[in-house]
Image (cartoon, rainbow, N blue to C red):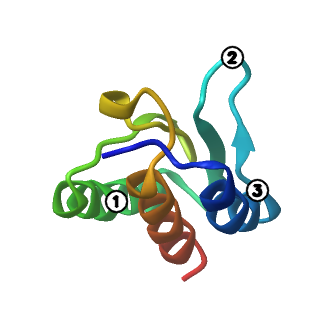
Amino acid sequence: MDALNKSERAEHIAPLLANGWEMVAGRDAFQKTFKFANFRKAFAWMTEMAIWAEKLDHHPEWSNVYRTVDVVLITHDANGLTMRDVNLAKRMDAAWKK
């Protein structure tokens, strides 16, 4: 999978940045911190996202401390952002807003 080109970035990444995602300094990746009411809800969300990650054949860099989940998305094979990252980010946002 190829990294997103300039026009694809404008179309697909800009809306994610407007929704709280941030570019990672020094990497072609983006990140977001998700906060939940408690650990159980955070872990349930991570479990749901793990299933989606498998379906999309894309796996996040993430960590969990109590009710907070920090996520970094990058397609390592492309050494940058691809539609895999965009699609997983959208799934994460949609599940978080439930």
The spot of residue 71 in percent (x, y) is 53, 41
Q: Which residue is mark 2?
A: 26
Query: Can you tell which quarter of the image residue 7 is in?
Result: bottom right
Q: Is residue 48 left or right of residue 94?
A: left
Q: Residue furthest top?
A: 26
Q: Is residue 31 left or right of residue 75?
A: right
- Of callouts 2 and 3, the N-terminal one: 3
Q: Residue furthest bottom?
A: 98
Residue flagged by tag 2: what amino acid is it? Gly
The spot of residue 82 in percent (x, y) is 45, 49
In the picture shown, does residue 14 fall above or below 34? below
At numbered mark 1, what does the secondary structure look like: helix, strand or loop? helix
Query: Can you tell which quarter of the image residue 54 is in?
Result: bottom left
Q: Which residue is mark 1?
A: 49
The spot of residue 75 in percent (x, y) is 39, 37
- The nearer-to-camera label among 1 and 2 is 2
Work out whether residue 83 or residue 25 is closer to the camera in this orientation and state it.
83
In the picture shown, does residue 18 fall above or below 76? below
The spot of residue 49 in percent (x, y) is 34, 59
Residue flagged by tag 1: what amino acid is it? Met
Density class for disc 1 (Cα within 10 Å; few <14, some 14-19, many ≥20) is many
At numbered mark 2, what does the secondary structure look like: helix, strand or loop? loop
At numbered mark 3, what does the secondary structure look like: helix, strand or loop? helix
Q: Which residue is mark 3?
A: 17
The structure residue drawn at horizontal position 54% and vertical position 83%, both measured from the top left corner, is: 98
Please report contact status of discs 2 and 3: CB closer than 8 Å, yes or no: no
